[in-house]
Image (cartoon, rainbow, N blue to C red):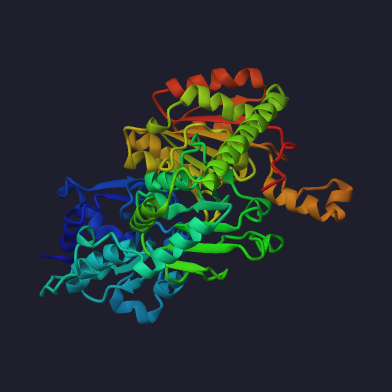
């Protein structure tokens, strides 16, 4: 058996059959043999970052490892921003980087560098193969490490000459990642401590993070919130991991929200993913904190928790639910009052959202509120829809007004390296081809890698991209404005505005195999979205939104 045979057959054995990649000469030995392996699918991308971002979306949607192939030093270095995204998101992407002939590496030849060291800050494990005998072992280990809690990316460097070597001996192999134990969490003492705190609290709240989706714990979070009449929030830097139509859900938290609670249960994320110095501290003095995560490095790292529980969200929440149910009288006056208060606050929130939508509905240029409302009408049911979001300043409106989020179908990039969204949406679609995929992108983010949609056209899948076009890197513009400095006084924002010359997104989309439409007036929006929904191929709707409407609470 040659190295390339060991490489490709092991990918088949591990069910890592979709490879996202941008090819190069160092990968030729296995690329040449691909036609012999009918189970393997090579998804060609036009940039290495696109390959890793697609693999990221694919891994998140499948909740399993994915493979991205990048080319030697330039390719690996191109992809580091995407690898950083995967690290922050905890996506188990196996990045396989081609490397030049190992026999001449000491001579610093063309395309060579120490790519293992370059990737170390962005991957859980990095390794460069030294002989063909290692290939099966290293691939098995890479998949296992990527899936070990906390999940995350790994990188393997594969010198070209090793792929043509003869495999001479077989090493004992790591356990197949699919046979690893998945359920773990919480010693009895910690569980009981958490139960005591939850039952004692007067105003408890819960924050659901990405591990809630990863471990399939959404229903358990719902049951505990109902049982204890808790408000449920999410973190603006992560996704939505709780059904938005549920009466306990109150959207992304603000510092004012958290300071109104005497206990906060943080489930399945770091505590907290702060953005600015002004946010610290996020919680009120004296508030009790319970932290649940599968990442021991993050457990109680930034805030002192009253109770830390190391474990997967599903196992721990099941234990908390069982213990709380046994000890709780659901007819208690405290709970009944909390339920009534929760109901009133939810009505107030829905009424606030309704009035805001009404206020901005006919605004020209188009408001983000109107866009989301029309998307709800056209694209409908959450069980049939996956939504990928990389529209930074429009995201608050999307989260507050979309009705289809069920805890499993919202995908976001907490790493914030731009260009992730459109590529990730193609990966999500390939992972779950029976579902519709809708991507919200900012115009700045879209312009990083619009060629991601060429791959969608090539493999014959459809995604709908709505570009929330405010003609600027609006997040940065808002930060500049908030300083009230020179640029603000002069009204000069050339460093962050994308308007001279204007970008014609519709033409770009059509030039890479998509259908497209441009919307500048709210009256045009419904027709454009209907066309996008009924199109047989990927469709880009470039919506010129009102740049003056922003959610200041974020």
- Judge from the rendering whether residue 137 lies leftward or rightward of residue 197; answer left or right: left
Residue at x 58%, y 26% (from the top left corner): 373
Q: Nearer the viewer, residue 353 or 227?
A: 227
Q: Is residue 505 above or below residue 220?
A: above
Q: Quadrant of residue 500?
A: top right
Is residue 88 visible in the rendered image? The answer is yes
Pick the front one: 420 or 403: 403
Q: Judge whether 179 appears above or below 389 on screen.
A: below
Q: How many marks?
A: 0
> Which residue in the rendered view is the most extreme toward the bottom?
106
- Whether residue 250 appears in this view of the structure is no
* x, y percent for residue 186: 36, 65
Q: Nearer the viewer, residue 47 or 52?
A: 52
What residue sits 75% from the left and 37% below the top?
548
Dividing the picture into quadrants, the one containing residue 190 is bottom left
Is 67 located above or below residue 471 in the figure?
Answer: below
Question: Residue 256 placed where, x, y %?
Answer: 68, 52
Q: Residue at 32% of width from left, 65% of height from top?
A: 148
Residue at 32% from the left image edge and 78% from the top image edge:
104
Left or right: where does residue 246 sit relative to residue 408? right
Q: Position of residue 509 (x, y in %)?
A: 51, 33
Left/right of residue 527 with respect to residue 22 in the rendered view: right
For the N terminus, the quadrant is bottom left
The residue lying furthest to the right in this view is 489
Drawn side of residue 519 relative to residue 516, left or right: right
Q: Where residue 280 sits in the image (x, y, percent)?
A: 67, 64
């Amino acid at each position: 058996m040659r190295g390339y045979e060991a490489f490709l057959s092991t990918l088949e054995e591990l069910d890592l059959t979709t490879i996202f990649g941008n090819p190069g000469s160092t990968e030729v030995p296995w690329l040449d043999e691909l036609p012999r392996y009918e189970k393997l699918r090579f998804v060609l991308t036009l940039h290495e970052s696109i390959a890793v971002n697609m693999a990221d979306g694919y891994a998140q949607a499948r909740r399993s490892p994915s493979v991205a192939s990048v080319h030697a030093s330039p390719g690996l270095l191109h992809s580091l921003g995407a690898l950083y995204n995967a690290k922050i998101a905890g996506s188990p992407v196996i990045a396989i980087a081609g490397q030049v002939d190992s026999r001449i590496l000491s001579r610093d030849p063309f395309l060579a560098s120490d790519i293992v060291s370059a990737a170390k800050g962005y991957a859980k494990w990095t390794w460069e193969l030294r002989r063909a005998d290692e290939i099966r072992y290293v691939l098995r280990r890479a998949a296992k490490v990527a899936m070990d809690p906390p999940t995350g990316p790994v990188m393997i460097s594969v010198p070209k000459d090793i792929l043509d070597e003869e495999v001479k001996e077989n090493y004992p192999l790591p356990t197949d990642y699919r046979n690893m134990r998945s359920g773990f969490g919480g010693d009895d003492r910690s569980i009981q401590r958490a139960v005591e705190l939850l039952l004692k609290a007067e105003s408890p709240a819960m924050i659901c993070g990405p591990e809630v989706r990863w471990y399939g714990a959404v229903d358990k979070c719902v049951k505990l919130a109902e049982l204890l009449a808790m408000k449920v929030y999410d973190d603006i830097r992560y996704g939505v991991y709780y059904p938005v139509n549920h009466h306990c859900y109150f959207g992304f938290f603000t510092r004012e929200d958290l300071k109104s609670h005497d206990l906060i249960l943080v489930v399945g994320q770091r505590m907290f993913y702060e953005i600015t110095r002004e946010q610290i501290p996020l919680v009120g003095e004296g508030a009790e904190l319970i932290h649940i995560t599968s990442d021991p490095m993050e457990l109680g790292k930034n805030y002192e928790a009253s109770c830390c529980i190391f474990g997967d969200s599903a196992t721990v929440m099941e234990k908390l639910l069982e213990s709380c149910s046994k000890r709780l009288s659901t007819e208690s006056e405290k709970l009944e009052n909390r339920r009534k208060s929760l109901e009133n606050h939810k009505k107030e929130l829905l009424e606030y959202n309704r009035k805001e939508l009404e206020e901005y509905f006919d605004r020209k240029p188009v408001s983000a509120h109107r866009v989301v409302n029309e998307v709800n009408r056209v694209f409908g049911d959450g069980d049939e829809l996956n939504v990928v979001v990389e529209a930074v300043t429009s995201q608050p409106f999307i989260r507050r007004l979309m009705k289809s989020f069920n805890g499993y179908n919202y995908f976001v990039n907490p790493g914030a390296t731009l260009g992730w969204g459109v590529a990730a949406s193609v990966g999500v679609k390939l992972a779950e081809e029976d579902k519709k995929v809708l991507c919200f992108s900012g115009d700045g983010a879209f312009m990083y890698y619009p060629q991601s949609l060429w791959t969608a056209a090539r493999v014959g899948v459809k995604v709908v991209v709505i570009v929330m076009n405010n003609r600027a890197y609006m997040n940065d513009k808002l930060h500049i404005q908030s300083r009230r400095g020179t640029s603000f006084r002069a009204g000069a924002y050339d460093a962050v505005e994308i308007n001279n010359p204007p970008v014609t997104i519709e033409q770009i989309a059509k030039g890479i195999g998509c259908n497209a439409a441009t919307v500048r007036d709210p009256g045009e929006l419904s027709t454009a979205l209907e066309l996008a929904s009924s199109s047989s191929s990927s469709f880009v709707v470039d919506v010129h939104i009102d740049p003056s409407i922003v959610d200041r609470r974020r």
